[in-house]
Image (cartoon, rainbow, N blue to C red):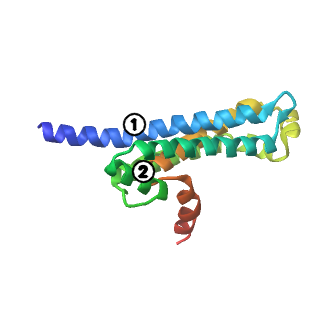
Amino acid sequence: MFGSLAAESAMLLKFGTVPVFAFIGGAVTTLLIYKLGSGPSGTSVTVMLLAGVAVSALAGAGIGLLNYFANDQALRDISLWMMGALTGASWPGIVLAFSTLVILYLCFVKDASKLNALLLGEAEARHLGVNIQTLKRTLIILTAVGVGVTVSLVGMIGFVGLIVPHLAEC
């Protein structure tokens, strides 16, 4: 009885807390970069890019600090996570990824007309009645959810951005 409970709690920890904390970390980082890049005159893409590079350097330093204090097994786990891999694929992970994909798809389809207006530019979308700031914040949160779940399942975003699109073409 306790063996199955321990196995279930380990699965709940893996597929419950890791994606939640990955989402929180992604959302906080994204909102920090957005806040640094936004000012009274609007959003500066250049400042956002520089803020992204700076935050990425800080995150890399944090991962380096974790590597320093890690034991042998944790160091192996961190190294494999940083490389990214599909070796940990399982049905609960696939269900989590697919359900997240469906929810995000429905949210993006709901805002499709606002996103199309935003393609014209912020000023034009504002004239068409789109609340730009609310839409940006919504997009940031939805993107953080997708990236957080993806990174928690397969590893760093570099792997996801470089390998997964090629796998999807097959």
Q: Is residue 53 left or right of residue 11?
A: right
Are discs 2 and 1 less than 8 Å apart at CB? no
| Mark 2 vs mark 1, CA separation in Å | 17 Å
Q: How many marks?
A: 2
Q: Quadrant of the N terminus?
A: top left
Spot occupied by residue 69 in the image (x, y as percentages of width and height): 40, 42
Label 1 sits on a secondary structure element that is helix
Task: Please give the residue where the numbered disc 1 appears in the rendered image.
Answer: 17
Name the residue that disc number 2 marks: 78
What residue lies at 76% left-to-right and 36% top-to-bottom?
37
Which label is found at residue 42? none
Residue under the image location 35 percent in, 48 percent down: 74
Q: Badge 2: few (under 14), some or many (20 or more) residues near its Cα, within 10 Å?
A: some
Mark 2: secondary structure? helix
Residue 4 is situated, as x and y percent measured from the top left of the image, at 17, 41
Up-down relation of residue 94 to residue 163 (above or below): above
Residue furthest out toward the left:
1
* Quarter of the image where one finds residue 110: top right
Q: Residue at x 71, y 30 (%)?
A: 134
Tell me which corner region of the image, top left, top right, bottom left or bottom right, holds residue 89.
bottom left
* Tag 2: amino acid: Ile
Q: Residue furthest front?
A: 68
Task: Kindly give the residue lying farthest to the top in the view shown.
Answer: 40
Residue beneath the point at 52% across and 34% down: 24
Which of the two labelled residues, at mark 2 and mark 1, occupies the earlier sequence position?
1
